[in-house]
Image: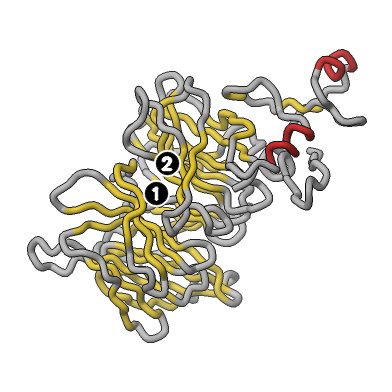
């Protein structure tokens, strides 16, 4: 597989193919080259080998240069990554932006599976546990291509947190009774750190990568959600205090001292799906009043100032998927989401700055409808989004390449 990387464009390395579109077919047909507009000397037309949506070819270098120089975020192209008779949900990028995982609702076997693309040029994804008796959900990428997820695979049929990585069979990381969910996997020193919830209590496991049986467990107490900051030093904690009608509390906990700092959120609100910005300065999350069914996008500054505040009302939230969060751009300057009100089931991908002062949207072909689960690639050199949409009968996974994030 050759890697095609456009030259440096006004100081920006736009890696159009090297990370996201590694496998391409390069045409050397002179007639084809002559028919394409504005090709630079020596530049060859590139075909993707996958179905493009809304455009019929990869843009030329001159077109890319013009798009990169535009201040507004815009789509260069959209392609269908995964299709089939089953519905797909919740695409998630690996930390290096080269792999993608999504949920597959296996309608024939009536179970939930994970579909993993090690590289986006793979023609078909792989299934980690390919059987009809078990289910997998809540995937969470760790360092490299390590993937933590919840599964009931095992002799005891308990739901455990499992680990999958390249060139190694998947295996369970947790033991004992209770449903395990909401995994988060991080690298720490020469080992790993796994945060997860067992029933209603959160635990933190640490172990050396090469000695997974040498686990140290630490109980963190009850909560609805916990989320480790990028540096692993703080926790975003959402919990229900138990007072009737009081809603939920939101706090930031220092992991070393276990001391909580309550955020100034209003009473009577529900919060969920919190996620830290890549620079660790902000939290984005969904919120709604208990008496309402309309979700809002909120942010909170880690420092407590400015206080938590709603950015946009009427956003689409997958209530069945607590691991599907608002999507931060790699530079922490934009949060991607989808509004709940569209035009005849058409929902453009939208973004807002964490302070709410800037916003924009990116349209795609109106042949696609019912957009869900937008996720931003964490690699700043590969500005792209993945999302789920319908073009025929089932929910399929798409990837949109942008001029910048």
The residue identified by callout 2 is 373
Q: Decide which of 357, 81 is in the foreground and name it.
A: 357
The spot of residue 17 in percent (x, y) is 73, 39
Residue 381 spot, x, y in % from top left: 68, 50
The residue at 79%/42% (across/down) is 5
> Relative to residue 19, is residue 42 drawn left or right?
right
Q: Are marks 2 and 1 in contact (CB under 8 Å)?
A: yes
x then y, percent, for residue 101? 51, 44
Categorize mark 2 by other alpha carbons within 10 Å: few (<14), some (14-19), many (20+): many
x then y, percent, for residue 130: 47, 39
Q: Is residue 50 left or right of residue 288?
A: right
Q: Secondary structure at mark 2?
A: strand
Q: Residue at x 30, y 64 (%)?
A: 198
Q: Could you tell me which quadrant the N terminus lies in?
A: top right
Residue 178: name its quadrant.
bottom left
Q: Answer yes or no: is residue 123 visible.
A: yes
Does the image show residue 113? no
Secondary element under disc 1, as helix, strand or loop, is loop
Per the image, the residue denoted by label 1 is 324
Name the N-terminal-most of marks 2 and 1: 1
Residue at the spot 54% in from the left edge and 53% down from the top edge: 329
Between 116 and 77, the one nearer to me in the picture: 77
Q: Residue at x 40, y 20 (%)?
A: 393
Quadrant of residue 48 in the image?
top right
Q: How many marks?
A: 2
| Mark 1, other Cα within 10 Å: few <14 / some 14–19 / many ≥20 | many
């Amino acid at each position: 597989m050759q890697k095609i990387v456009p030259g440096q464009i006004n100081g920006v390395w736009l890696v159009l193919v090297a990370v996201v579109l590694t496998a391409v077919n390069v045409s050397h047909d002179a007639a084809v080259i002559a028919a394409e507009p504005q090709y630079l000397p020596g530049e060859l037309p590139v075909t993707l080998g996958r179905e493009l949506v809304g455009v019929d070819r990869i843009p030329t270098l001159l077109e890319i240069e013009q798009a990169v120089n535009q201040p507004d975020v815009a789509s260069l192209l959209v392609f269908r990554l995964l299709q089939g008779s089953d519905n797909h949900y919740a695409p998630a990028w690996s930390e290096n932006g080269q792999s993608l995982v999504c949920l597959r609702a296996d309608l024939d076997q009536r179970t939930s599976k994970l579909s993993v693309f090690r590289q986006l040029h793979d023609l078909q994804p792989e299934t980690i546990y390919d059987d009809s008796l078990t289910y997998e959900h809540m995937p969470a990428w760790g360092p490299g291509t390590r993937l933590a997820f919840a599964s009931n695979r095992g002799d005891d049929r308990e739901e455990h947190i499992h680990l999958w990585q390249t060139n190694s069979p998947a295996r369970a990381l947790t033991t004992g009774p209770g449903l395990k969910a909401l995994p988060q996997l991080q690298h720490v020193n020469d080992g790993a750190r796994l945060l997860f919830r067992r029933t209603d209590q959160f635990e933190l496991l640490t172990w050396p990568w090469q000695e997974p049986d040498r686990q140290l467990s630490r109980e963190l107490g009850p909560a609805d959600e916990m989320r480790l900051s990028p540096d692993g030093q703080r926790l975003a904690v959402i919990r229900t205090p138990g007072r009737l009608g009081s809603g939920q509390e939101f706090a930031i906990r220092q992991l070393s001292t276990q001391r909580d700092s309550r955020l100034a959120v209003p009473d009577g609100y529900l919060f969920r799906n919190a996620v830290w910005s890549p620079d660790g300065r902000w939290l984005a999350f969904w919120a709604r009043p208990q008496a309402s069914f309309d979700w809002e996008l909120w942010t909170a500054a880690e420092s407590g100032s400015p206080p938590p505040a709603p950015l946009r009302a009427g956003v689409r939230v997958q209530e069945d998927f607590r691991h599907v969060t608002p999507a931060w751009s790699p530079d922490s300057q934009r949060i991607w989401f989808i509004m709940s009100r569209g035009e005849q089931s058409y929902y453009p991908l939208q973004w807002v700055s964490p302070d709410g002062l800037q916003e924009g949207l990116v349209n795609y072909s109106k042949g696609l409808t019912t957009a869900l689960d937008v996720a931003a690639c964490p690699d700043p050199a590969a500005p792209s989004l993945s999302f789920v949409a319908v073009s025929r009968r089932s929910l399929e996974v798409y990837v949109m390449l942008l001029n910048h994030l």
